[in-house]
Image (cartoon, rainbow, N blue to C red):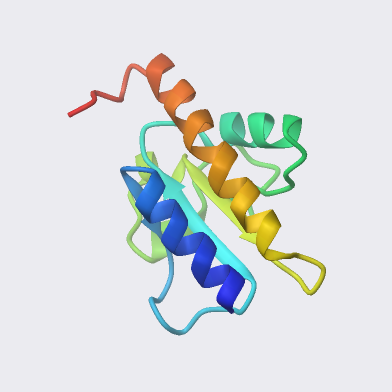
Amino acid sequence: EPLRDKLMKGLVERIDEVLITGHPQKRLPGHVSVCVRYIEGESMLMFLNMQGVAASSCSTCTSKALKASHVLAAIGIPAADAQGSLLFTLGQDNQEEDVDYVLEILPPIVQRLREMSPLYHKK
């Protein structure tokens, strides 16, 4: 749980317009599900993969379909936000350095993709 909590806290602190999905306390130990607004999860995954990070863009129930997760819709996440979903799973082999690495590389990825997004208007 400490790694999961560090990753969730770090994502919220380093990336604006990111939503942690799911219940605030009743969470799976190694499960971090977020929605990054104004960009596509698949685009983030491509850049994360190029940096050696494995993640997914939605629940496994819809991973083959290019549509918003019905699970995220059921908990009230708008379809536009759900398009930017990312799912990280942490296991016993993950270390704090792994979380630090994701927190180092993901914010610039998000920034780059948002610069290309017609939906994102920096405040």
Q: Is residue 80 above or below residue 92?
A: above
Dividing the picture into quadrants, the one containing residue 123 is top left
Give the residue displayed 50% in from the left and 71% down from the top: 5
Residue 88: x %, y % from top left? 63, 57
Seen from the viewer's position, the closer of residues 26 and 122 is: 122
Whether residue 88 sits left or right of residue 6 in the image: it is right
- Residue drawn at (60%, 53%), measured in percent from left and top? 100
The image position of residue 18, as x and y in percent, is 37, 48
The correct choice, above or below, for 118 with respect to 94 in the image is above
- Name the residue furthest left: 123
Query: Looking at the image, which is closer to me, 32 or 104?
Result: 104
| Rendered location of residue 83, percent (x, y) | 47, 40
**Hey, which quadrant is residue 17 in on the image?**
top left
Check the image and name the residue furthest to the bottom: 26
- The residue under the point 75% across, 65% down is 94
Indicate left or right for 45 with 76 as reference. right
| Whole-percent x, y for residue 46 in the image | 67, 30
- In the rendered view, tell whether residue 11 sits above or below residue 41: below
Task: Classify the position of the N terminus by image quarter.
Answer: bottom right
Does the image show residue 62? yes
Q: Quadrant of residue 38?
A: top left
